[in-house]
Amino acid sequence: MPIIAENISHVYNKGQPDETYALRDVSFSIEDGEFIGIIGHTGSGKSTLIQHLNGLLKPDSGRILIDGRDIMSKDVSLRGIRRKVGLVFQYPEYQLFEETVAEDVAFGPKNLGIPPDETDQRVREALRLTELDYDEIADRSPFELSGGQKRRVAIAGVLAMRPEVLILDEPAAGLDPKSHVQILEMIRRVREERKVTVILVSHNMDDVARLCSRVFVMEKGELILSGTPREVFSQTELLRKAGLGLPAAADLIFRMRTLGADIDGDILSAEEAADAVIKWLRKKGKRGR
Amino acid sequence: MLRDITLGQYYAKDSVIHRLDPRVKIVAVIVYIIMLFLVRDFIGYAVSFAAAAAVICASGVPFRFILRGMKPVAVILALTFLLNLFLYPGTVLLSAGPFHITQQGLHQALFMACRLILLIFGTAILTYTTKPMKLTDGMEALMSPLSRFGFPAHEIAIIMSIALRFIPMLVQEADKIMKAQQARGADFESGNIIRRVRSLMPLFIPLFIGAFRIAQDLAMAMEARCYRGGTGRTRLHVMKLHKRDAAASVLLAVYAGLILAERILPALF
Ligand SMILES: Nc1ncnc2c1ncn2[C@@H]1O[C@H](COP(=O)(O)OP(=O)(O)O)[C@@H](O)[C@H]1O
Ligand SMILES: [Mg+2]
């Protein structure tokens, strides 16, 4: 289910003193099975952009095509789009409301008119995917869970709709390091198991470099750069201008280079950095001798 | 759909009206409202309208913003107009079936509509040109003589200012939660009334929980910064009356004088 954005722009509070251009002429296309990372400074328009992909926001100009059809046209059901494109908002745990975890996760499937026994099956599956124990947790109130658990429940609520595209807005924001790693690992497994397209908004360059197949860089409402993590993170200047950093390993090599070390190649992971440094030390050793 | 709420919104601009002391503005609006209730005929309304229009022009707030502030009360306005128009007894001007429009009814309907519209103009100018914080500061200052008799002037002012700051926050929060539930297939717009009210539960529960969370955080943050109520508290911005405030007061007196004269003088003759 390819998603195509054609020159979309979005303005908040049009015609008022606090008018904001949140998106300007953004275009891209996303193929099935991709793992897209969206990075950008706070206020660069990431959240606004993803809310267009399931029709929660309407572009002021331009259009979004899903399966080749403009999602704002009359004959496309927005509910159908929202079933196929699951969106997990930032801090989704603040949106829990039902008395029990199971009921909360079932909210989406119920809205879609899924029969009760299938709903139950989906709830179990979603909780399993998010690594929560159904028997232990299903009948508890979502409000008595820990922060990390609440977030999983909220993500399960979207997974229970069995979306084909899963969009997550900073899913690890505000979590402790351990839960952070677990949430991302969970996303990676969901993607493999359910073969969904994943769009991940993140402030963590290491996560993006490690997981994503393609990265979009947003700045002031514009899509200024897109490509593989290797391509994107080699554009140090552009990223710095957009107020963004580099993955830790790439940053280390970048700093060594600015101090005069002649290390070449685009380096992303810790392993690559280690190899490159060893190679560089050997070379230096030989020259020194 | 939640964005339409403009009541109490501030329109940033640097006009003489914006710079007036909030106390003067509050007193002026109160006097203006009292005058509107004293007015007996359309001449008084014409004078009031001229006064309000002059202030709007001086404030630089576009007229359409003032009109937009009317949207939330448009229903009340229409209802008042229609009820007066059709139900007021008197000399019949026009009748169709069970409906009669009387001469007095027409007069009364127009009269009440004018009053309502002018009332809204007054309060809209006040909120468009005065930051909420200044507004509550002004109210606190005006109420403070009463605190000698145990009236909690400072507490009421701080409650109002916090409430005012909460409104946009809650609107934003509600918008976010609604979108999140819509992303899960929720439908807030169709179905009969019971379904619609039920569909609001997923909105209200997280909203209330969020409001309590924010309130608790705010209380903690205030306590951490040694907040302890009104007694002995000094201000960052001390309110001082300027020449323009004196000028405004004179103009206000002229306006009130005109209205009162118009009301009383015919009685004298
Ligand atoms: N509901 C809204 N109303 C008005 N302005 C908004 C709203 N949401 C976001 N904005 C503005 O739009 C811009 C982009 O915001 P957002 O998409 O949230 O960025 P990001 O997710 O990258 O931090 C910001 O300037 C923000 O202030
Ligand atoms: Mg955001």
Image (tube, helix red, strand yellow):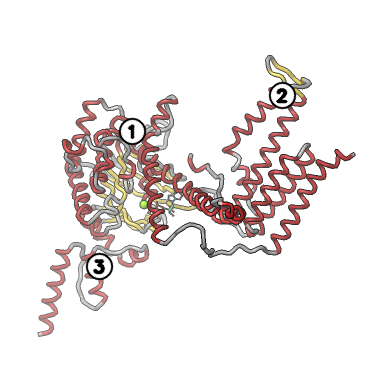
Q: Secondary structure at mark 2?
A: loop
In the image, residue A276 above or below residue A5: below
Q: Which residue is most to the right?
A: B269
Residue B139 in sight from this viewpoint? no
Place residue B90 in its image quadrant: top right
In the image, residue A261 above or below residue A83: below
Q: Residue at x 27, y 62 (%)?
A: A233
Q: Are marks 1 and 3 on the same chain?
A: yes
Q: Secondary structure at mark 3?
A: helix
Q: Which mark is residue B88?
A: 2
| Neighbourhood count class around disc 3 (C-alpha, 10 Å): few under 14, some 14–19, many 20 upward | some
The residue indicated by pointer 3 is A251
| Neighbourhood count class around disc 1 (C-alpha, 10 Å): few under 14, some 14–19, many 20 upward | few
The residue indicated by pointer 1 is A80
Place residue B102 in its image quadrant: top right
Q: Residue at x 48, y 41 (%)?
A: B2
Q: Residue at x 76, y 48 (%)?
A: B256
Query: Of tags 1 and 2, which is closer to the observer?
Result: 2
Residue B264 position, x and y percent, is: 82, 41
* Chain identifier of the residue bearing label 3 in the image: A
Q: Nearer the viewer, residue A37 or A114?
A: A114
How far apart are the alpha carbons under marks 3 and 2? 80 Å
Q: Secondary structure at mark 1?
A: helix
CB within 8 Å, label 1 to label 2: no
Q: Which residue is most to the top?
A: B97
Query: Of tags 3 and 2, which is closer to the observer?
Result: 2
CB within 8 Å, label 1 to label 3: no
Residue A175 position, x and y percent, is: 26, 53
